[in-house]
Image (cartoon, grey):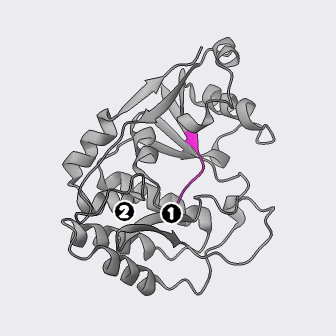
Amino acid sequence: MRAAIMQPYFFPYIGYFQLISAVDVFIVYDNIKYTKKGWINRNRILQNGRDVMLTLPLKSDSDTLDICQREVAADFNRLKFLNQLSEAYRGAPYFSETLHLVEHIVSFKDENLFRFLHNSIVKTCAYLGVSTEIRISSEIDIDHSLKSQEKVLALCDYIGAKTYINAIGGIELYSKYIFRLRGVDLKFIQSKPFEYKQFGSVFVPWLSIIDVLMFNSTDLIKECLNFEYDLIEVS
């Protein structure tokens, strides 16, 4: 069994979904600290030929809270959010179907940040035909006071994963030797460049999955999810 573990992100880039597609079980962290200025509640889209930030506003609260303890702002204007996407992408080849998907996702009324993001990931995976089992970290019976590598290994052990795949950005965080001692192969996923036409402008890479969906068919995206990456082992 292959597993991956990540915190949830707001309409993340295609590499996030490649990671989900590459494993049998994908665990989403809910009981992990919310980090400001990351990708948990924001991402980038294309607007007038350049990348701009798309943000899910949050209720003001302590920075020490876990993701599952944060809330979407009560005044989050869903219509304004959709109008921003409409202005940015009207005329894109897959505009109507993508906007319908996003509208369905942002209409989710639960104000809990984790549940909102979890729902968006599940719905996007279903739209793309990704059948990976998605589990929530706090619902897995391990010692949740464990940190970093030890927590990852505990989660892998509990679900019976023999291979753990991590995003390439975490290559310095884990020891292949320690994983091997615990009977788990450690691999890292590296996305290959995926370039496509964006209204004829200079291509802006690694934007939100929304951008990918606006300009590409689901068949092409599925092919990218399944084949356009490398799995890397470190010594």
Choose between 206 and 40: the one closer to the eye.
206
Left or right of 169 on screen, residue 153? right
Which quarter of the figure has residue 112?
bottom right
Element under disc 2: helix
Question: To which residue does mark 2 refer?
Answer: 210
Residue 24 in view, yes or no:
no
Q: Residue at x 58, y 58 (%)?
A: 39
Residues tagged 1 and 2 counted as in contact (Cβ below 8 A):
yes
Q: Amino acid at mark 1?
A: Asn
Q: Residue furthest front?
A: 202
**Residue 43 numbered mark, or none:** 1
Q: Residues within 10 Å of mark 2 (few under 14, many from 20)?
A: many
Quadrant for the C terminus in the image: top right
Image location of residue 234, percent across then percent down: 57, 18
Q: Which residues are magenta?
A: 5-9
Q: How would you classify the magenta stretch by its main secondary structure?
A: loop
